[in-house]
Amino acid sequence: MLLVLIGAPAAGKSRIGKKVARTLGVPFIDTDTEIVRQHGAISELFAAHGEAHFRTLERVAVEHALSGSGVVAFGGGAVLDLRTQADISSLPVVLLTVEASAVAPRLANGKRPLISSIESWQALVDTRRELYESLADFSIDTSHRPTEVIATEIAQWARSRPSQKDTP
Ligand SMILES: Nc1ncnc2c1ncn2[C@@H]1O[C@H](COP(=O)(O)OP(=O)(O)O)[C@@H](O)[C@H]1O
Ligand SMILES: O=C(O)C1=C[C@@H](OP(=O)(O)O)[C@@H](O)[C@H](O)C1
Ligand SMILES: [Mg+2]
């Protein structure tokens, strides 16, 4: 199986995705983690080579992740790529959302080069909201509940879907 998590930076894709995978007993792949493993820190990649270069590396990481199985957490901008939009159109896609009022403490680590403030986070999310929603089969808000509870609900939703062999 493949299950894809999308959504805004700091919505919880990486942390919750790992728990969903553990709950389902399947592998977990985070495209950003793969990029960092192969190429170094994301902030350094942006600084040295620019966003376009990062997006090229990200597309390769997405293709690789989608060629396997399990739970896949994308970086927030991965779905900007039209090929990626097409690739996930037939897969179960979960959108994680978070309110601006809850996101500030989650942005503290400074590891996201496109986000320098809550205002820049909001502006970026505003440009992507419709796209995120159009790609999602299931949406869940992460603002005010523990990650374990959210992960359990996502796993239940995934399990409740008809399996491939049941689909005509
Ligand atoms: N439901 C939640 N409640 C509180 N903190 C959360 C929740 N989900 C994620 N976080 C925290 O927010 C930060 C960003 O989460 P992360 O999984 O890296 O988001 P993303 O991968 O979507 O950018 C992390 O410090 C994480 O522990
Ligand atoms: O939204 C974006 O464009 C980005 C989100 C980040 O991932 P998270 O969504 O996991 O923070 C990371 O891929 C990079 O900083 C760019
Ligand atoms: Mg992440």
Image (cartoon, rainbow, N blue to C red):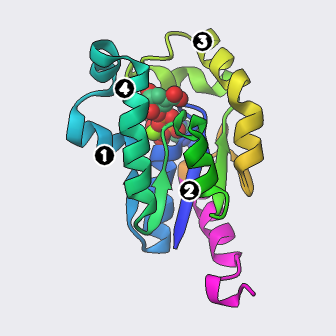
Task: Give the Cα separation between the discs numbered 2 and 1.
Answer: 15 Å
Specify start and end residues of the magenta stretch as a single range: 148-168
Given this view, does label 4 or label 2 mark the residue nearer the observer?
4
Q: Earlier in the sequence, mark 2 or mark 3?
A: 2
Residue type, label 2: Val
- By secondary structure, the bulk of the magenta-drawn segment is best described as helix
Q: Which mark is residue 4?
A: 2
Image x and y of residue 65, in percent: 40, 57
Image x and y of residue 92, in percent: 64, 63
Image x and y of residue 109, in percent: 38, 22
Label 3, secondary structure: give it: helix
Task: Give the Cα separation between the discs numbered 2 and 3.
Answer: 25 Å
Which residue is found at the position 55% from the left and 49% from the top? 147
Report the residue marked by disc 3. Answer: 120
Residue type, label 4: His
Given this view, does label 4 or label 1 mark the residue nearer the observer?
4
Q: Earlier in the sequence, mark 3 or mark 1?
A: 1
Report the residue marked by disc 1. Answer: 34
Residue type, label 1: Glu
Given this view, does label 3 or label 1 mark the residue nearer the observer?
1
Q: Earlier in the sequence, mark 4 or mark 2?
A: 2
Label 1, secondary structure: give it: helix
Given this view, does label 3 or label 4 mark the residue nearer the observer?
4
Q: Earlier in the sequence, mark 3 or mark 4?
A: 4
Q: Are marks 3 and 1 in contact (CB under 8 Å)?
A: no
Taking 58 as reference, is 114 above or below it?
above
Which residue is found at the position 60% from the left and 33% from the top? 8
